[in-house]
Amino acid sequence: MVRTTGSERALGVFPPKPNAVEELFGTPKVVIGAVHLPPLPGSPHYEGVPLDEICAFAIEEARAYLDGGAHGVIVENHWDIPFLKPGEHGYETAAAMAVVTDRVRHATAGRVGVSVLSNAAECSIASAWSGGAGFVRVNQWANAYVANEGIIEGQAAHATRYRSRIGANPVKIFADVHVKHGAHAIVADRTLAEQTEDAEFFGADVLIATGSRTGDAAALDEVEGIAANTTLPVVIGSGISAGNVGELLPACDGVIVASSVKDNGRWWGRVDAAKVRELTAAAAKAGVVLP
């Protein structure tokens, strides 16, 4: 399957909007690197590391992605495990994420997004708007699922009102359709097509397809199923490697990469710029225009 443009697809369930991927990155297909931050203040693994050191780490990781040919990065509090549910995050999380995001943006001049786990849409939007980021990732935008943290409900209604209230409407929403690390039995009677339409109907700007957990690749038929039922750009959010990016990119509008380009192949490793270059070279062969 070759991913079609919005004008070539049928009108979706939400009035047409500009292509958020092209607006943010200036190109229709992108590679985005995930910056997995060390433990932040307030989290169980935090041991008093000064925020300046956390910022320096994030900048190094971001530069490795961008120097390797990625179009942008997304800053994520992945070491704040176990994750809180939406609405439970302290002020310290939003503050730290905003500061780190701002430092990364200024140091790299790259396109930056924010993801506060788990599914903390309002905290992510606050951090993104304060830190100058252009987008956020929200794992459960519509409907609900059972996750490690318990029952997680869609955040669209509250998050869009909060975004409007603080004047942050320019911040785009990247929303997962079938979020990883979760069971979707709550909505098992709704098809992939219906859940895709739900996320678009509730105002998402970009949809994300993933595997079942961090580092697992999304199935091609799932990516194609999401893409066939939305007018929005579709990005793959897990399991991308130099070995599979050529197969998956034609079916979507971009990828978010992390584990496969770490020095140890795990999310907690350091980004290896040589591995990033290997992946972006494979992406270029699949039609991605590198920055």
Image (cartoon, helix red, strand yellow):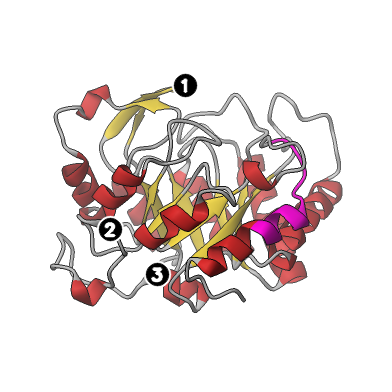
Mark 2 sits on what residue? 203
Mark 1 sits on what residue? 148
In the image, what residue type sits under mark 1? Answer: Asn
Quick one: quadrant of the C terminus? bottom right
Q: Are marks 3 and 1 in contact (CB under 8 Å)?
A: no
Q: Secondary structure at mark 2?
A: loop
Percent position (x, y) of residue 41?
A: 73, 36
Of circles 2 and 1, which is in front? 1
Quick one: quadrant of the N terminus? bottom left
On whether residue 76 falls in the magenta region, the answer is no
Segment colored magenta: 268-278
Left or right, 85 with respect to 280, comes to left
Q: CA distance from mark 3 to mark 1?
A: 30 Å
Whichever of labels 2 and 1 marks the residue nearer the N terminus, that label is: 1
Q: Secondary structure at mark 3?
A: helix
Name the residue rendered at 54%, 75% in the picture. 289
Q: Are marks 2 and 3 in contact (CB under 8 Å)?
A: no
Name the residue rendered at 44%, 59% in the picture. 249
Q: CA distance from mark 2 to mark 3?
A: 12 Å
In the image, what residue type sits under mark 3? Answer: Ala
Percent position (x, y) of residue 277?
A: 70, 61
Q: CA distance from mark 2 to mark 1?
A: 26 Å
95 or 63, which is in the foreground? 63
| Neighbourhood count class around disc 1 (C-alpha, 10 Å): few under 14, some 14–19, many 20 upward | some
Mark 3 sits on what residue? 20
In the image, what residue type sits under mark 2? Answer: Gly
